Amino acid sequence: MTRYLLPHFHIASLLFRTRTERKAVLLRARMELERYLKQLDNYDILSKEEARLYERYKERPDNFSTASISDAASRRQTKIDRFKEEKALKEKLEVSMADFAMACDVDNQMLTSYNLSASPAQPFSSCHR
């Protein structure tokens, strides 16, 4: 399901790498990220903290910041917290992908043993990679 939510995110990521017409590109990337966040919010995928931040963003998108501009310690701590969250999400994703791959291997082994014993006309695979 998540792959259907990611196109706006990927478009924005690609736009951020573009070097021509910087202001127009940034506005388009922002629009794509806003669409992505709206989808996440509509599907209730955002955590309570993320939903709170998103609501703050919607109130004042031009002046939104996750940390105080004048407080360097606060900005640093916010950066550290975001890095830790991102790292935890990446680890969780890796575990999920490994579990999925293992489940596919088990399913394919079961199907192979079934195919060998029953010899169906058209064997099939349960997982697509």
Image (spheres, rainbow, N blue to C red):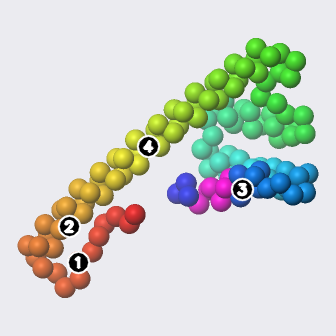
Q: Which residue is mark 3?
A: 14
Q: In the drawing, does residue 42 fall left or right of residue 24?
A: left
- Marks 1/4: CA–CA distance: 30 Å
- Marks 3/1: CA–CA distance: 40 Å
- Say which mark, if any, is on residue 10: none
Residue 68 position (above or below residue 125): above
Magenta-span inclusion, residue 9: yes
- Marks 2/3: CA–CA distance: 40 Å
Q: Which residue is mark 2?
A: 111
Task: Mark yes or no: residue 18 visible.
Answer: yes
Q: Earlier in the sequence, mark 4 or mark 2?
A: 4
Residue 61 position (above or below residue 79): below
Q: Please state which of the two labelled residues, at mark 1 or mark 4, is closer to the viewer.
A: 4
Amino acid under disc 1:
Pro
Q: Which residue is mark 1?
A: 123
- Say which mark, if any, is on residue 94: 4
Amino acid under disc 4:
Glu
Q: Please state which of the two labelled residues, at mark 4 or mark 2, is closer to the viewer.
A: 4
For the residue labelled by badge 2, is the local secondary structure a helix, a strand or a loop? helix
